[in-house]
Amino acid sequence: MTLKTRFAPSPTGYLHVGGARTALFSWLHARKHGGKFVLRIEDTDLQRSTAESINAILEGMTWLGLEYDEGPLYQTQRFDRYNEVIQQLLDSGQAYRCNCSKERLDSLREEQMQQKLKPRYDGHCRGKDIGADEPHVVRFCNPSSGSVVVDDLVRGRIVFSNEELDDLIIRRTDGSPTYNLTVVVDDSDMGITQVIRGDDHLNNTPRQINMFDAMGVEPPVFAHLPMILGPDGAKLSKRHGAVDIREYRAEGYLAVAMLNYLVRLGWSHGDQEIFSLSEMIDLFDITDVNQSASAFNPEKLLWTNQQHIIASPPEQLGEALVPYLRETGLDPDEGPDPVEVAAGFHERAETLSQMAASARYCYEDFEAIDPPAAKKHLRPVTLAPLRAVRDRLADLPDWTTASISTAVEETAESFEIKMGKLGQPLRVAVTGGSVSPPIDVTVYLVGRERTLQRLDQAIGFIEARAAGEQP
């Protein structure tokens, strides 16, 4: 039998960190074992499911590169199949109609809680002859004795007593099927062999296994992932980073970096922190996932992203940088090749959006030089060296980092000053600030025309300052 996993989100919101990790673990498990990965949209909650949420899930999956072999499959297109199974369960006596009123159920619950009992349906309608044409729900006839054993790939063996489980509703009064029924039918029909999901579903598992048994179907193997907590130990929320996964794309995170960070939320391989996608597939083992909850750390995610930016080939990084340049309001055609910008800035950028913002001076002129930087570095003592290096740069036959470096070094030597005494004023003059890539790379990216123009402005600034005028 072919190994098959699935990711089955409910389209009542966006794809967030927790859902993305579940999808990743399911995808990795399938890829590692040569199996198939299915995307199923569980949209039976008709009031809360939206097309916008479906689009958010699909876009998030596409950005992360978690391609699926089957799907997206939609539960709302399978209602006839669910009703067929429900009728089979009714006919075999493994399900029954229930017309208990809300008042009776509320009273039963209150009485059980007063007696410090676990609230559960008491089977009042079992064996009653309730017509299909009167208002009712359909309940699954859960075994009243024995136990359900779950050999969980993450949590190990867990035993549930059937006496603790009640006869759950599998079809509502309005005729719509419920989650526990639809997921069992879908997993059975789609041949799902491994179900990897959050441990918030753990209590559903014994009920679902009993339904698999009632249908005469071998249940899949389960793996329940521990929760992801915020840095403060509380349940992950928006303030921690449980946002639409697409927001990380908008902020300039690399998809592989996000996957790398997610895979380390509960799984490890020795002390290794940075993984390529192929390494994740080769090394990931669902049985190595920790049983304890993981903490989401935005700083660690940012560090992981920076490491992947540093390691990315400039060609790939440059292509990825283009939309962020445009988003920043820059025209990639009005400056250096984005590939060269990526090569120059990759060691000092944490995100692509940050890289684009830092490279602004390469594509458009700045309004003014940073006052503290100008006061510290554009002083009368630097006037002669800046004039000299300006002339050297103007006369360069080839505009390359090597020729620029030679021009700056030889100018510094001719004035018997250290490189920093010339390099930093030059940097401030051509970028408007005191931080940039190495000076030869910076000047190369700014370009000959802009460099000479900005040096002329800086020289004028210093001349005015030397003359005691207000520039």
Image (cartoon, rainbow, N blue to C red):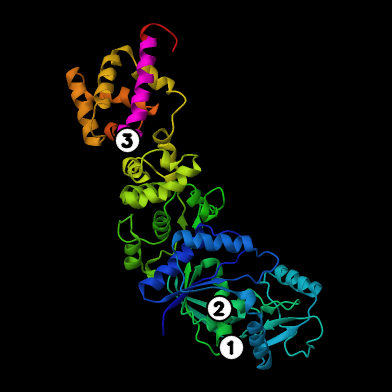
Q: Amino acid type of disc 2?
A: Pro
Q: Residue 407: where, in percent of width, then height?
A: 21, 27
Please tell me how crowded label 2 is: few (under 14), some (14-19), or many (20+) other residues with Cα within 10 Å. many
> Going from the N terminus, do you reach mark 2 or mark 3 first?
2
Q: Residue 329: where, in percent of width, then height?
A: 50, 39
Mark 3, secondary structure of its residue: loop
Q: Is residue 463 magenta?
A: yes
Q: Can you name the residue that lies furthest to the top here?
A: 468
> Going from the N terminus, do you reach mark 1 or mark 2 first?
2
Q: Is residue 236 rendered to the left or right of residue 12?
A: left
- Label 2 belongs to which residue? 206
Q: Residue 336: where, in percent of width, then height?
A: 36, 40
- Label 3 belongs to which residue? 437
Q: Is residue 41 rendered to the left or right of residue 124?
A: left
The quarter of the picture where the C terminus appears is top left
Q: Nearer the viewer, mark 3 or mark 1?
A: 3
Label ID, residue 214: 1
Q: Main secondary structure of the magenta part?
A: helix
Q: Amino acid type of disc 1?
A: Ala
Q: Between 187 and 197, which is closer to the camera in this rendering? A: 187
